[in-house]
Amino acid sequence: MSFINHVEIPVLDFKKAKKFYGGIFGWTFQDVPEMDYVLWHATDRPHGGFVRVKKMPKKSTVNIYFEVQDIEALLKLVKKGRGKVLKPKFPVGTMGWMAQFSAPDGCVLYLWQNAPKQDQPAQ
């Protein structure tokens, strides 16, 4: 089972993006300066983030992250289904791991696996 965990929106200016999206949707924000990133919260937990770009892509680029229990198992299914692994599982700080893949038609998507809680063994 998986679900959409995180939506990443490209922006040119964090301050303007916070004002715009906060004003429209009522989101709150958490700056992550060490990653040059801003998390946005629709409820009590992050639902997405702003990734800073120097120039807006010509085509709309919104990154979708599917939360899964086991990235490696899902990447095997991607390959079996004739998709491509673009970036294998790699750590994102202490928060978890991610991977990037493309569907057979070229659509690029991401997988996310949360790091285990302190009292749970690592997978």
Image (cartoon, rainbow, N blue to C red):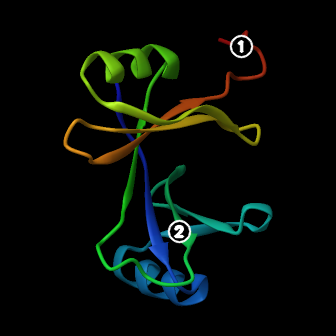
Check the picture and name the quadrant holding the N terminus: top left
Q: Position of residue 53 (x, y in %)?
A: 55, 77
- Extreme residue toward the left, this view: 105
- Which of these two is toward me, 46 or 114? 114
Q: Is residue 19 visible?
A: yes
Q: Residue at x 39, y 77 (%)?
A: 57
Which quadrant would residue 65 be assigned to in this image?
top left
Please determine whether, in this image, residue 82 is positioned above or below residue 108.
above
Q: Position of residue 29 (x, y in %)?
A: 59, 69
- Which of these two is toward me, 48 or 51? 51
Relative side of 76 to 17, left or right: left
> Tags 2 and 1 in contact by the CB under 8 Å rule?
no
Q: Residue at x 29, y 74 (%)?
A: 59
Q: Earlier in the sequence, mark 2 or mark 1?
A: 2
Q: Residue at x 65, y 11 (%)?
A: 123
The residue that mark 1 highlights is 122
Q: Dot 2: within a 10 Å radius of its alpha carbon, few (fewer than 14), some, or many (20 or more) residues?
A: many
Relative side of 97 to 47, left or right: right
The residue that mark 2 highlights is 50
Q: Secondary structure at mark 2?
A: strand
Q: CA distance from mark 2 to mark 1?
A: 29 Å
Q: Residue at x 29, y 15 (%)?
A: 80
Q: Amino acid at mark 1?
A: Ala
Relative side of 48 to 59, left or right: right
Indicate which disc residue 45 carries: none
Q: Position of residue 24 (x, y in %)?
A: 35, 81
Please determine whether, in this image, residue 53 is positioned above or below residue 89.
below
Q: Is residue 1 visible?
A: no
